[in-house]
Amino acid sequence: MEQKYCQSCGMPMEDSLYGIEKDGTKSDDYCSYCYKDGEFGNPNETMEDMIETCIPFMKESGMDEKQAREILNNQLPQLKRWKK
């Protein structure tokens, strides 16, 4: 099975991490940290805000800040929420 990623933060998705739509069904695109009840938890968040939110979690897994920032700056613009 192909690995899916949250289309807002880029986190790898597992069954327990999928967000929920307004009708209670599982979101195919977004994780539960970004998306609840059919809405983004922080609807005014910019992509730059999301990068700053994600960096500490990537650092916890052993990545340095420069590398995390580079990955996020390359990955996030490709995701559904941030594509222009």
Image: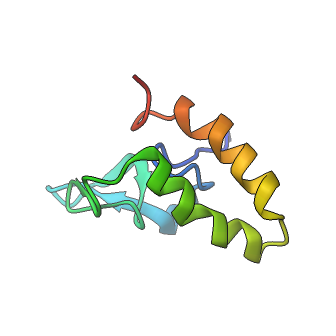
Residue 46 relative to residue 38: left or right: right
- Left or right, residue 27 beside residue 7: left
The answer to which quarter of the image holds residue 21 is: bottom left
Q: Position of residue 9 (x, y in %)?
A: 52, 52
Quadrant (top left/top right/bottom left/bottom right) for the C terminus: top left
Q: Locate residue 10, reporting x and y percent.
A: 58, 49
Closer to us: 25 or 44: 44
Query: Residue 58: where, in percent of width, then height?
Result: 71, 66
Position above or below: 26 against 77: below
Observer-nearest of 27 and 73 = 73
Residue at 49%, 49% (x, y): give it.
48
Residue 42, picture quadrant: bottom left
Residue found at x 55% / y 29%: 78
The mark total stands at: 0
Report x, y in % for residue 68: 74, 55
Residue at image location 48% in from the left, 55% down from the top: 50
| Furthest residue in direction bottom, as rendered | 60
Give the colouring mode of the picture.
rainbow
Image side of residue 64 versus residue 82, left or right: right
Quarter of the figure that contains the N terminus = top right
Outermost residue to the left:
23
